[in-house]
Image (cartoon, rainbow, N blue to C red):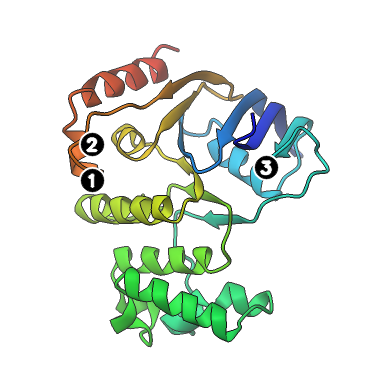
Amino acid sequence: MADTILTLKNISYSYHSLNGEVKALDNVSFSVRTGEFLAIVGPSGCGKSTILSLIAGLLRPESGDITFYTDDPQDAKPGIGYMLQHDHLFEWRDIYRNVTLGLEINGQLTAQKKERVLNMVEDYGLTPFLHKKPSELSGGLKQRAALVRTMALEPDILLLDEPFSALDYQTRLHVSSDICRIIRAAGKTAILITHDLSEAISLAERVIVLGQRPARVKREIPIRLTLPDDSVLAARNAPEFQNYFNMLWEELNDE
């Protein structure tokens, strides 16, 4: 498909140790459209994070192909940004020096890039905290700073590995809604790993359900909600929401 940015085809992967082999993924296949917000759910330990590590190039599949844009494995890769469960901000650097760290490491800290970062900082409500240390910020503000750091490198694909799981429930709702809005406004492709079915339904355009380890794709569910606006609260109050929740719950509990 012309608008496909990422394809995983028959991906298998195992972890090896002195105690033996643990097969994490078994013939996992799916594609992601350019600009799509995709969620992946599955049982704990089934290999969800392994998929993100493979996409990011931190691991290499034992079999199968991961391709970008075309079917040619040698085709140029898009820029990839990775947000983890924890913000991993450095306490000895203030927020400004944290959010510009990637640009600094890559030798891209130009005046134009700095101006873009400052605009994002303003948009994300971080301007008053630019010269604070991470310990002086709330969990939600630290995750916003982590997003600015990731977005500063202008990635085409964002990998989100449960980035809201360390936040309290109310903060999680606000921050996930804000980050989703920011990603969509920027036209970025995003893949979210989450254990929260409500979060998957309210944020994603499509949800991939994985089975028990070794993971395989059990089902792909397009999400179509009737919404008065694009807020997380509106999504959770949509008439279709409960049906999607029940569908996902049944898929995850029928093994």
Question: Could you tell me how far apart the alpha carbons at marks 3 and 1 are, in whole angstroms?
Answer: 31 Å
- For mark 3, give the secondary structure: helix
The kind of residue tagged 1 is Ser
* Mark 1 surroundings: few (<14), some (14-19) or many (≥20) residues within 10 A: some
Q: Is residue 90 visible?
A: no
Q: How many marks?
A: 3
The kind of residue tagged 2 is Ala
Percent x, y for residue 88?
Answer: 49, 67
Question: Could you tell me how far apart the alpha carbons at marks 2 and 3 are, in whole angstroms?
Answer: 31 Å
Which residue position holds label 3?
A: 54
> Which residue is at a point 67% across and 31% down the rendered structure image?
8
- For mark 1, give the secondary structure: loop
Question: Could you tell me how far apart the alpha carbons at marks 1 and 2 are, in whole angstroms?
Answer: 6 Å
The correct choice, above or below, for 53 with respect to 48 in the image is below
The kind of residue tagged 3 is Leu
CB under 8 Å between discs 3 and 1: no
Percent x, y for residue 22?
Answer: 68, 30
The answer to which of 94 and 206 lies nearer the viewer is 206
The answer to which of 61 and 29 lies nearer the viewer is 29
The answer to which of 212 and 77 lies nearer the viewer is 77
Q: Which mark is residue 231?
A: 1
Position of residue 188 in the picture relative to residue 139 (left or right): right
Q: Quadrant of the N terminus?
A: top right
> Which residue is at a point 40% across and 75% down the rendered structure image?
119
* Mark 2 surroundings: few (<14), some (14-19) or many (≥20) residues within 10 A: many
The first of marks 2 and 3 along the sequence is 3
Q: Residue furthest front?
A: 2
Which residue position holds label 2?
A: 235
CB under 8 Å between discs 1 and 2: yes
